[in-house]
């Protein structure tokens, strides 16, 4: 493997490596690991995390006249 002198590339590689490791750890921990991680990442916050993604986002469409 060649080493890069570009700090941006090295930072990106490090971030990808950390994301892969985190995904592997979450897969080993079970189905609630992702929710636990999200809770830890957002605490303390005034708004709770969403357990589900909305089916339809935004306001209702106005009907044309």
Image (cartoon, rainbow, N blue to C red):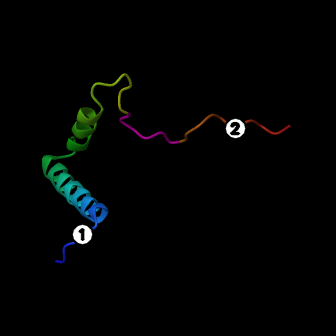
The boundaries of the magenta stretch are 50-55
Label 2 sits on residue: 61
Placement of 2 over or under 32, stated as above or below: below
Q: Main secondary structure of the magenta part?
A: loop
Inter-mark Cα distance, 1 to 2: 52 Å
Name the disc covering residue 5, or none: 1
Q: Please give left or right for residue 16 compared with residue 56 in the image.
A: left
- The residue sitting at the front extreme is 5
Q: Nearer the viewer, residue 34 or 63?
A: 34
Lower sequence index among marks 1 and 2: 1
**Which quadrant does the C terminus fall into?**
top right
Q: Nearer the viewer, residue 50 or 17?
A: 17
**Which quadrant does the N terminus fall into?**
bottom left
Magenta residue check for 23: no
Placement of 22 over or under 63, stated as above or below: below
**Occupied quadrant, residue 52:** top left
**Occupied quadrant, residue 62:** top right
Q: Residues within 10 Å of mark 2 (few under 14, many from 20)?
A: few
Number of dots carrying numbers:
2
Q: Please give left or right for residue 33 compared with residue 48 in the image.
A: left
Does the residue at mark 1 contact the one at mark 2 (Cβ under 8 Å)? Answer: no
């Amino acid at each position: 493997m060649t080493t890069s002198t570009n700090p941006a590339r090295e930072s990106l590689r490090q971030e990808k490596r950390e994301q892969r490791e985190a995904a592997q750890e979450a897969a080993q921990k079970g189905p609630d690991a992702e929710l636990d991680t999200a809770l830890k990442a957002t605490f303390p916050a005034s708004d709770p995390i969403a357990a589900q993604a909305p089916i339809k986002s935004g306001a209702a469409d106005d009907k044309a006249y």
